[in-house]
Amino acid sequence: MIRVAGIERPWHAGMTVADVLKEIGDEADACPVVRVNDHYVSRPNFDQTNIPDNAQIFLIPMIAGG
């Protein structure tokens, strides 16, 4: 199991950040960065960053300011 934004989700070997975000859907579109445990991962690395079992994943949305 992994925990994504506080919700438990099933985990499988070889799961990447991109896989998790596809499962979440629209909610993940505004997240150019996610935190996997204590490591920050940016969008260009989503496909090659594996998720370990029991990971906690935090969605970090883009916030516009001015």
Image (spheres, rainbow, N blue to C red):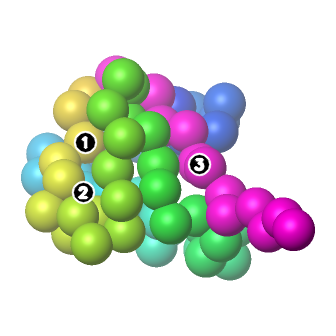
Q: Secondary structure at mark 2?
A: loop
On residue 16, which mark appears? 2
Q: Give the foreground label among 3 and 1.
A: 3
The prevailing secondary structure element of the residues shown in magenta is loop
Asked whether, in this view, residue 66 is left or right of residue 48, the answer is right
Tell me which segment is drawn in magenta: 54-66
Question: Mark 1 packing: few (<14 Cα in 10 Å), some, or many (20+)?
Answer: many
Judge whether residue 62 is colored magenta. yes
The image position of residue 13, as x and y in percent, is: 14, 45
Is residue 13 in sight in this rendering? yes
Seen in the picture, residue 46 relative to 4 is either above or below; the reply is below
Three-letter amino acid code at disc 2? Thr
Judge whether residue 56 is colored magenta. yes
Q: How many angstroms separate mark 3 from mark 1 (CA)?
A: 14 Å
Mark 1 highlights which residue? 51
* Tag 3 near tag 1, CB within 8 Å: no
Question: Mark 3 packing: few (<14 Cα in 10 Å), some, or many (20+)?
Answer: some
Residue drawn at 61 percent across, 76 percent down: 29
On residue 59, which mark appears? 3
Question: Mark 2 packing: few (<14 Cα in 10 Å), some, or many (20+)?
Answer: some
Three-letter amino acid code at disc 3? Leu
The image position of residue 19, as x and y in percent, is: 34, 65
The image position of residue 39, as x and y in percent, is: 32, 32
Residue drawn at 84 percent across, 65 percent down: 65
